[in-house]
């Protein structure tokens, strides 16, 4: 078992190294597809006003805890691996609306996705196995998680000059399907640790929705995938 895990970790390392190699795209980046949703309500998603830095596809889990008093799940955050899809989608713009679903299907086809680990590195290996089933595998870009105080965090540690964002949610609209988590717009929370990226859109979401009811006080992780468009 140790040998298998070591081999998978080595594969993840190779994907990480791939992110440092030069990549060429013969096309410009696609446009942010906000017209796919009903972009109204109290917190619509604004059109971008700054430059696009990355388009990423992220796979992982949306996490919830059951509230025994209400019988409803409460969102507690998310944990996801970030893959750089910028060049891929520039050359395959017809897949902007389908790449998330492709990746979620690849992820949930892995037995390890049904039993998320308490160790981030092992979860990363599971997500990397899914990425290896895509042609071509996308370069690893970083990690998305929530801090202990509930701050959404985007650590693009394999991006040039280490882009980093502690964010706050500003926009929130329902996804086209009620089976998928909302589309979001998040901006910098003003942290001096933030670097390069100042805002991000979560779009093209697939999965991640908790069951409508629960009992007890247990926690669950619901697989999801989404595109995250990062702006400077």
Image (spheres, helix red, strand yellow):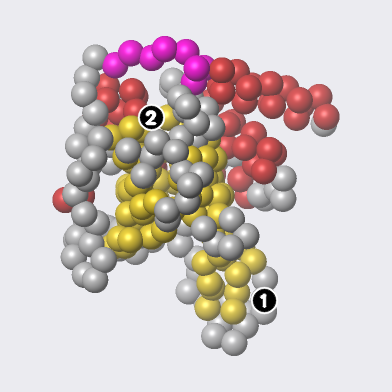
Between the residue at mark 2 and the residue at mark 1, the CA separation in whole angstroms equals 37 Å
The x, y position of residue 220, in whole percent, is 61, 63
Residue segment shown in magenta: 18-25
> Crowdedness of circle 2 by 10 Å Cα count: few (<14), some, many (20+)?
many
Residue closest to the eye, 105 or 185: 185
Q: Residue at x 59, y 31 (%)?
A: 129
> In this picture, is 40 found above or below 33?
below
Q: Residue furthest bottom?
A: 69
Q: Residue at x 69, y 26 (%)?
A: 8
Q: Is residue 126 left or right of residue 139?
A: right
Q: Residue at x 44, y 20 (%)?
A: 136
The question of residue 228 being in magenta is answered with: no
> In this picture, is 217 found above or below 97?
below
Q: Which mark is residue 140?
A: none
Check disc 1 and report the residue beneath it.
217
Q: Residue at x 69, y 39 (%)?
A: 122
Quadrant in which residue 150 is drawn: bottom right
Q: Secondary structure at mark 1?
A: loop
The mark nearer the N terminus, 2 or 1, is 2
Residue closest to the eye, 141 or 59: 141
The x, y position of residue 68, in whole percent, is 62, 83
Residue closest to the eye, 85 or 170: 170
Q: Is residue 218 left or right of residue 136?
A: right
The x, y position of residue 81, in whole percent, is 53, 39
Q: For residue 130, say whether it is visible.
A: no
Q: Is residue 179 left or right of residue 3?
A: left
Check disc 2 and report the residue beneath it.
85
- Counting the numbered discs, the total is 2
Q: Quadrant of the N terminus?
A: top right
> In this picture, is 16 found above or below 189?
above
């Amino acid at each position: 078992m140790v040998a298998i895990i070591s081999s998978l970790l080595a594969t993840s390392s190779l994907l990480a190294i791939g992110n440092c190699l030069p990549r060429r795209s013969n096309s410009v980046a696609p446009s942010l597809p906000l017209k796919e949703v009903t972009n109204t309500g109290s917190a619509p998603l604004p059109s971008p006003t700054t430059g696009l830095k990355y388009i990423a596809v992220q796979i992982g889990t949306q996490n919830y805890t059951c509230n025994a008093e209400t019988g409803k799940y409460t969102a507690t955050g998310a944990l996801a691996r970030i893959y750089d899809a910028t060049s891929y989608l520039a050359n395959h713009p017809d897949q902007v609306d389908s790449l998330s679903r492709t990746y979620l299907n690849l992820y949930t086809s892995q037995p390890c996705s049904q039993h998320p680990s308490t160790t981030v590195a092992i979860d990363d290996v599971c997500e990397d196995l899914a990425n290896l089933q895509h042609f071509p595998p996308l370069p690893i870009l970083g990690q998305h998680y929530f801090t202990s105080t509930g701050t959404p965090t985007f650590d693009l540690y394999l991006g040039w000059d280490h882009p980093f964002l502690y964010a706050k949610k500003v926009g929130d609209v329902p996804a086209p399907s009620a089976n998928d988590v909302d589309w979001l717009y998040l901006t910098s929370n003003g942290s001096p640790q933030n670097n390069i990226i100042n805002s991000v859109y979560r779009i093209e979401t697939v999965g991640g929705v908790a069951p409508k009811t629960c009992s007890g006080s247990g926690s669950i992780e619901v697989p999801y995938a989404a595109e995250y468009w990062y702006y400077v």
